[in-house]
Image: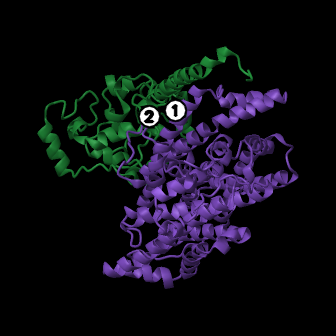
């Protein structure tokens, strides 16, 4: 008989299994919580070159989203306003405000304001902004209550599951056309108008793709 | 007294003429070798100095393996387009290579599991090496579908893990079944291999302890998991081994059945046939025994193992290759028969195209290697000519690679739409990546024969003539 190991090492395999089990459980739990868009993206609120306050403009003043983001319902790409759009008002309103120095400089030089993009679809995803807006998907569905934000914040996860939840059951998420830019409005389903939602889906031929190539073209 | 007895019991005259045929059982360990000789022989391979030929082979094998590594780095860095498959042949060499390697593994599982349950004692001399071959073949096989997914860092999508994408695996797809079939197969093969090795690892630990080699005693002892060879250990060990044999037995049939479903479940002419599962399993075992012979015959010569791997073993392996090879040949005939009898014009065209179309060269190479080559094993003279058997075993594997190539390429290049017909030309990356897997396999196998007992000593001792106290009587 050869004793390479002491008697204590008899319990070693069991201990190892237990440790690995605990370690595996911890890693799984950590990945499940921390490595998801819900954790990684939500709350992203970068410092912008101009401290533009959506809660003031869209909330208190009641500007329509499309006054600045003028192509969101016409183009696949949702545009940011040029500094000319800002200056429509700010030539007269607070024309000397130091907060607007960047806008005035942009207006004079023609170089765009270097806004930091907050909501970004990955390059392997085909996303057409207009088709969503025109088929009853309100701004608030993906961007949250922008009209209450002082600084634009990434409010929803925008994960693939987030997209698929709506693509699989659009009737739950659609709003009436006149409610699309009123971010406080509730969905047709929340208003109990499920029949209207169903008719809308039928009339507007809403068939959100669920195949891989629907978005990953 | 004897006269009286003879008179009382009249022996019928006919009995004197009855001569029962003498059918001696083949001896599994020749020259009446002792237990100690077996231990010294097998352990000596590990304990002795590393032979020069081992270093040379290891260097060559590692160099060849670097082709796979380089090919895969280039593939990941550039994209899966560096492989030669194009629409309509989206399964090119990588899938051919996958089926080829996964098939080779089947002989190891057959030898270790089915032959164990059937109490075929001759398995003992070759099962360890065959199981090692299985595991290393699965490693080589796994490379191809893993990288064929394109973005290999997303390969975990194959497993049903909760994710933030809101997607779930398609369990109606045979490709998904493949994931589970092959990973189960790999896991069970490793377990079976390892559990069978524990008594031998214990022996090596004891020998290294006695020799004062503490590091190696520690390492072998670690994996021997406190094996003492007590009665209770043996009792548990035998039961564990039997259970694992029971678990592994269906895998011999299921893994390649599911691999064949990758094809048979589709609607492509030439793939959509019910004969595929048995035909693939027979082919897999055929190719596996080809590979076992390819590996074991040189080992037998280099390490002078003729007393342990006897002519009887080689005969048996050749006969299994003959049986399974003939089954494959029968399946080839049946495919043609059904193509004619089924009267489906697409199916009929596919098989005419296989034999006489642009891939006729591959088809007839396949038929030569898989139908004609095994027929040589009918002859005792051939089976006793070790060099010839070895060459035939190489041809078996050439043939089985060709078979998968023919199945994949002929059907995909000639589908229903003539406008999408094509011809597959592999790229250099295809060829190098496949070539390199022989290096991966060789490197792993060389490490195995250098550091692990390549024959189950405990089991061999149990089948020696010495272990039979009654010398064959009773």
Left or right of residue A137: residue B118? right
Residue located 72% across and 56% down the image: B439
Q: What label sits on residue A103 in the rendered view?
A: 1
Q: What label sits on residue A52 in the rendered view?
A: none
Q: What label sits on residue A86 in the rendered view?
A: 2
Q: Please state which of residues B415 and A165 is positioned toward the viewer in this rendering.
A: B415
Is residue B236 depicted above or below B468 in this figure?
above
Tag 2's secondary structure?
helix
Q: How is the image coloured?
A: by chain
Measured as percent of width and height from the top left, residue B150 is found at 54, 53
Cα separation, mark 2 vs mark 1, equals 8 Å
Q: Are marks 2 and 1 on the same chain?
A: yes
What chain does mark 1 sit on? A
Left or right of residue B205: residue B132? left
Residue located 72% across and 32% down the image: B220
Which of the 4 image quadrants contains residue B227? top right
Measured as percent of width and height from the top left, residue A25 is found at 50, 24
Outermost residue to the bottom: B356
Q: Please state which of residues A167 and B7 is positioned toward the viewer in this rendering.
A: B7
Q: Colour of chain A?
A: green
């Amino acid at each position: 008989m050869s004793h390479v190991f002491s008697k204590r090492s008899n319990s070693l395999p069991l201990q190892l299994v237990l440790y690995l089990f605990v370690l595996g459980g911890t890693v799984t739990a950590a990945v499940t919580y921390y490595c998801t868009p819900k954790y990684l993206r939500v709350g992203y609120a970068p410092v912008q070159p101009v401290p533009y306050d959506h809660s003031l403009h869209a909330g208190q003043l009641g500007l329509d989203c499309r006054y600045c983001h003028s192509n969101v319902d016409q183009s696949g790409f949702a545009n940011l306003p040029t500094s000319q759009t800002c200056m429509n008002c700010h030539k007269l309103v607070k024309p000397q405000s130091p907060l607007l120095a960047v806008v005035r400089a942009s207006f004079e030089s023609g170089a765009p304001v270097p806004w930091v993009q907050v909501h970004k679809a990955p390059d392997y995803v085909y996303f057409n902004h207009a088709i969503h807006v025109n088929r009853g998907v309100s701004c608030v569905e993906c961007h949250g209550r922008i009209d209450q934000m002082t600084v634009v914040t990434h409010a929803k996860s925008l994960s693939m599951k987030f997209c698929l939840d709506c693509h699989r059951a659009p009737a739950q998420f659609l709003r009436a056309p006149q409610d699309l830019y009123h971010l406080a409005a509730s969905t047709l389903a929340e208003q109990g108008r499920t029949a209207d939602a169903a008719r809308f889906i039928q009339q507007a031929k809403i068939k959100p793709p669920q195949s891989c190539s629907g978005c990953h073209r | 007294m004897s006269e009286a007895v003879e008179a009382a019991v009249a022996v019928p005259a006919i009995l004197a003429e009855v001569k029962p045929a003498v059918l001696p059982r083949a001896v599994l360990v020749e020259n009446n070798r002792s237990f100690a000789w077996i231990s010294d022989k097998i352990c000596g391979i590990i304990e002795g100095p590393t032979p020069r030929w081992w270093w040379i082979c290891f260097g060559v094998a590692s160099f060849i393996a670097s082709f796979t590594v380089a090919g895969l780095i280039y593939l990941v860095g550039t994209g899966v387009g560096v492989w030669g498959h194009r629409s309509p042949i989206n399964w090119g060499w990588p899938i051919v290579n996958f089926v080829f390697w996964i098939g080779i593994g089947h002989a190891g599982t057959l030898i270790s599991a089915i032959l164990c349950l059937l109490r075929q004692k001759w398995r003992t001399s070759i099962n360890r090496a065959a199981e090692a071959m299985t595991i290393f073949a699965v490693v080589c096989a796994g490379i191809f579908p893993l990288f064929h997914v394109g973005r290999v860092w997303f390969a975990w999508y194959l497993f049903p893990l909760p994710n933030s994408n809101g997607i779930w695996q398609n369990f109606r797809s045979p490709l998904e079944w493949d994931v589970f079939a092959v990973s189960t197969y790999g896991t069970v093969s490793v377990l079976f291999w390892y559990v069978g090795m524990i008594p031998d690892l214990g022996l090596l630990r004891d020998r290294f302890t006695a020799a004062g080699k503490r590091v190696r005693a520690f390492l072998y002892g670690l994996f021997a998991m406190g094996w003492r060879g007590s009665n209770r250990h043996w009792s548990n060990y035998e039961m564990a081994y039997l259970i694992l044999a029971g678990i592994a037995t269906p895998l011999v049939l299921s893994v390649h059945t599911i691999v064949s479903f990758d094809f048979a479940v589709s609607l492509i002419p030439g793939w959509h046939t019910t004969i595929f599962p048995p035909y693939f399993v027979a082919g897999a075992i055929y190719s596996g025994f080809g590979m076992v012979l390819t590996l074991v015959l040189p080992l037998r010569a280099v390490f002078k193992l003729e007393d342990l791997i006897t002519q009887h073993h080689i005969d048996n392996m050749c006969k299994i290759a003959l049986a399974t090879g003939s089954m494959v040949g029968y399946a080839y005939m049946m495919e043609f028969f059904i193509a004619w009898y089924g009267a489906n014009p697409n199916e009929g065209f596919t098989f005419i195209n296989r034999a006489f179309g642009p891939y006729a060269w591959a088809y007839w190479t396949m038929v030569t290697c898989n139908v004609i080559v095994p027929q040589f094993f009918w002859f005792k003279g051939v089976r006793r000519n070790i060099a010839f058997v070895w060459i035939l075993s190489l041809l078996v594997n050439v043939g089985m690679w060709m078979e998968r190539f023919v199945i994949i390429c002929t059907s995909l290049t000639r589908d229903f739409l003539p406008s999408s017909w094509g011809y597959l030309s592999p790229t250099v990356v295809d060829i190098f990546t496949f070539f390199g897997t022989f290096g991966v396999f060789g490197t792993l196998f060389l490490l195995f024969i250098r550091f692990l007992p390549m024959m189950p000593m405990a089991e061999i001792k149990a089948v020696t003539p010495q272990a039979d106290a009654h010398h064959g009587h009773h």
